[in-house]
Image (cartoon, rainbow, N blue to C red):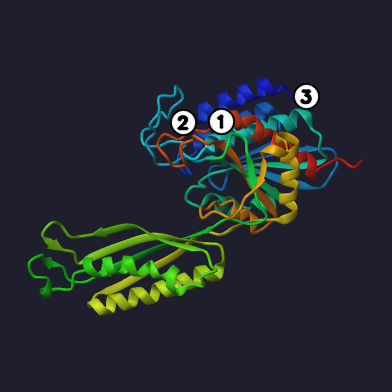
């Protein structure tokens, strides 16, 4: 039996080391080496690096069972300057683990150690350490590199810390959990000129501002009131200056939804609005619309197993069903397009700074809970025949 206290101490050390050396998506070279070296020291059967760029996949097999499940953690950090006095604060200017991926990585390493030492399952566990989650490319890169063919598995489970919930509170739900994220860019082109003579050209500031406001009507007036969607303009850039009317305006933003039809409807209505406003103001418009994240939808059977495993670790009082899906996005959803699974949340503390905040920090208090949960999932789903 693994010494839980000693494991928690080691996991905390791992987490602090990772936190001090954050790396952006597809740049996780040191992180991947750290993960691979730790897994080899733990004694898993196989460690493969460079999957999908900087991803790492480890395999642990016990018994003769032919079933396999996967446990996944993300490794990348964000382009955010950390504000912290912690001794393990980021040593990389302008980059920090502001979403807790350092904690997720340490948690899965802890689960790997527990399962390597204790066994208790009959089959194969894949430990997937994924790069570039933050910009929605890492899961696709691993899948494109043959993940499912090279390391086949039948189910997959993931875990994310959740600021605002009590430390160690376990929350998930069946069905939609997190939204899709679409990105859009609209470029208006006209003829700029002197601010004193707007009639001499076809400047793009006024139609750009009109467009920003008109896009808000897509959700309130064009979609079914029962549909869930958010349209957000996040950037407004022009080539004007204090006394120069712009001849080009770029508008960027994102769209969140839970249904592919809603996503398609938003794109269609956005295109009509852009064309109409551009024509009304005598400017031209070009719109690019991309789908970066797909909706994350939990499988019913896998979610029931996730709740059962969590109860064995945390007790009934710390378990709850999420009231509704959230409009954040997560590329774990890409794996769920291929195999069933469950994505869950573990409370990071009611006083925790929010994710992507320069003062955010992962709570070391939940490391052991997360590792024990992952191990329990493997032992339940690959339980030896009685």
Callout 1 touching callout 3 (CB < 8 Å): no
Alpha-carbon distance for marks 2 and 3? 32 Å
Mark 3 = which residue? Answer: 1
Residue 39 in view here? no
Residue 206: x and y in percent read 22, 68
Alpha-carbon distance for marks 2 and 1? 11 Å
Residue 252: x and y in percent read 35, 60
Q: Is residue 6 left or right of residue 376?
A: left
Residue 327: x and y in percent read 51, 55
Q: Nearer the viewer, residue 120 or 357?
A: 357
Local crowd size for mark 1, using a 10 Å CA cut-off: few (<14), some (14–19), many (≥20): some
Q: Residue at x 46, y 37 (%)?
A: 353
- Against 225, is 64 above or below? above
Residue 179 in view here? yes
Mark 1 = which residue? Answer: 34
Element class at badge 1:
helix
Q: Residue at x 54, y 51 (%)?
A: 330
- The C terminus lies in which quarter of the figure? top right
Q: Residue furthest front?
A: 317
Element class at badge 2:
loop
Mark 2 = which residue? Answer: 21
Element class at badge 3:
loop
- Whichever of callouts 1 and 3 sits on the residue coming sooner in the sequence is 3
């Amino acid at each position: 039996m693994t010494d839980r206290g000693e494991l928690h101490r080691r996991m905390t050390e791992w987490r602090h080391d990772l936190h001090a050396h954050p790396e952006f998506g597809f740049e996780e070279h040191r992180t991947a080496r750290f993960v691979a070296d730790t897994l080899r020291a733990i004694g898993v059967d196989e460690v493969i690096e460079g999957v999908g760029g900087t991803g790492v996949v480890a395999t642990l097999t016990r018994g003769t069972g032919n079933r396999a499940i996967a446990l996944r953690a993300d490794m990348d950090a964000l382009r955010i300057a950390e504000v912290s006095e912690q001794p393990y604060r980021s040593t990389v200017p302008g980059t920090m683990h502001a979403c807790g991926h350092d904690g997720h990585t340490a948690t899965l390493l802890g689960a790997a150690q527990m399962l390597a030492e204790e066994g208790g399952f009959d089959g194969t566990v894949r430990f997937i350490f994924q790069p570039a989650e933050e910009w929605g490319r890492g899961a696709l890169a691993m899948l494109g590199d043959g993940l499912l063919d090279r390391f086949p598995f039948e189910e997959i489970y993931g875990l994310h810390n959740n600021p605002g919930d009590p430390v160690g509170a376990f929350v998930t739900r069946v069905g939609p959990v997190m939204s899709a994220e679409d990105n859009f860019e609209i470029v208006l082109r006209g003829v700029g000129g002197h601010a004193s003579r707007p009639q001499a050209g076809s400047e793009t500031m006024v139609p750009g501002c009109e467009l920003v406001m008109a896009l808000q009507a897509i959700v309130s007036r064009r979609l079914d009131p029962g549909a869930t969607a958010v349209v957000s303009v996040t950037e407004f850039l022009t080539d004007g200056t204090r006394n120069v009317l712009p001849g080009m305006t770029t508008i960027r933003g994102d769209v969140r939804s839970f249904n592919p039809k809603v996503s398609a409807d938003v794109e269609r209505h956005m295109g009509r609005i852009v064309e109409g406003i551009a024509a009304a103001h005598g400017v031209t418009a070009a719109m690019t619309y991309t789908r970066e994240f797909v909706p994350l939808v939990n499988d019913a059977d896998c979610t029931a197993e996730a709740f059962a495993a969590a109860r064995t670790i945390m007790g009934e009082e710390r378990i709850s069903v999420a009231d509704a899906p959230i409009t954040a996005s997560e590329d774990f959803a890409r794996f769920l397009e291929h195999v069933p699974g469950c994505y869950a949340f573990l409370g990071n503390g009611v006083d925790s700074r929010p994710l992507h905040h320069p003062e955010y920090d992962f709570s070391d208090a939940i490391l052991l809970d997360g590792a024990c949960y992952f191990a329990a999932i493997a032992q339940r789903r690959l339980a030896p025949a009685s």
